Amino acid sequence: INPHKTPLFSHRRPQSTMTIDDAAEYPERDDLITPLYEPSCKGDSARPEETGTTRSSSNNVDNDKEPILGTASLTGKSTSDTAAQRAAYAAMFAVFVDAINMMCIAPNLPIMVTPGLHEDSFPSTEPFDIATAQYAHDAVEALGMVISNFVFGYIADRIGSRKAILLLMIGSCCTSVGIYLVRSNYWSFIAMTFANGLFGSAAAIANGYMFIIYKNDREKADEFGGYVMATLMVGLTVGGLFTLFFPSNLFRPLLLSSALCFLAFVVCFIFVFVPSESPVEIDSEPEEDDIPLDKRAISNVIIGASFDHLGTLGIYPLAFSPVMYQRFFLDFQIANKVPIMSGNEYRWLFSMIGLAAVPAALLMPLVNKKLGVAISTIISNLITAGAIIALLSVAAIDPPTHSSFV
């Protein structure tokens, strides 16, 4: 009955292999029987008496509470697995839409800040020149996202990941419309871009959410964490491609992005749930094998991640804009020459580069398992540094040619 000698009355009871007949033979051991009925969501109408099983008073389930994942039936299958997967996919959809929202006008930014180049270009970006105007946009958006990660991380801890994701989606929906409404003024555009960045942490919250719904399955949580990053990269690519659908209106992709944010809000409202009363912990009692939090290691991770992000900007977007945009397009436009790179080619390249990170995101759990997180991170940063040096060397070739562009 209990071959592993686990505590029979532990708050985390082992899954039982007893049958109904075994229960009849050992009536005093009803604590080992996991009931067939566990509600997977609010409002389940089935009742334990309809299944023909008995349950102890300690196993009563309050239908007014959120479902708890990992509960097993006599068949050995979890009744909440499907709900958990739906919640995970809904959270990933929110990440996908959030990435689209962040990228849907980014390939158009150099054109926007070049006065007179397009009918939707800003009349003026004073006192900034073209390059600085782009830097300012990227800086305020990145600052908003940094603040968002801290603020919504705290919100997720206090009131739950579900509510945090819903707030992010409805906030992104509103700020996207706001950017579109102030599209005629550069500084109003910058202000609304910062506000949009404040709701740009869906990937971080969703990644943490995977470790909540799969708390007792670390391998599964790591797997979905990789899926979250891959979804983010695909979303960035799709968002960039939105600009190709509206070549005559640089800001119109924002309206489509806003509609998708509202759709993601609805999807997450239906499928995303918190699997326990606490938004962080499923079990209130501490585990004997819990490892104390290493604050020094956490601080090093945060500092390292910050520098990693700054270094990655050397490729995306700075190598594209202003370097590639100015060298192979704008300088030729100013000199009244045929550019080596067309506007649509720039949009395609800017958008598709995100797909290069998808294989890395999918392989990340396996590589981390084989080499360790620290070693794999060092290797990836060395590769990034080498790529940046190569790009700068190519961009320095004067005059720029079709060969250097390729």
Image (tube, rainbow, N blue to C red):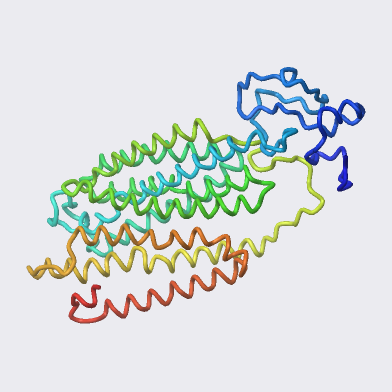
From the viewer's perspective, is residue 352 above or below residue 193?
below
Q: Nearer the viewer, residue 158 or 280?
A: 280
The image shows residue 293 at horizontal and vertical percentages of 71, 57
The image shows residue 56 at horizontal and vertical percentages of 83, 25
The image shows residue 228 at horizontal and vertical percentages of 50, 51
From the viewer's perspective, is residue 124 above or below residue 45?
below
Counting every numbered tag in the picture gives: 0
Q: Residue at x 62, y 42 (%)?
A: 213
From the viewer's perspective, is residue 115 above or below residue 263?
below
66 with respect to 286 (left or right)? left
From the viewer's perspective, is residue 138 above or below residue 29?
below
Q: Tell me if I can see residue 345 in this picture.
A: yes
379 with respect to 295 (left or right)? left
Q: Name the quadrant of the N terminus.
A: top right
355 with respect to 7 (left or right)? left
Q: Nearer the viewer, residue 304 or 49?
A: 49
Q: Nearer the viewer, residue 141 or 188?
A: 141
Q: Name the quadrant of the C terminus.
A: bottom left
Q: Residue at x 10, y 68 (%)?
A: 338
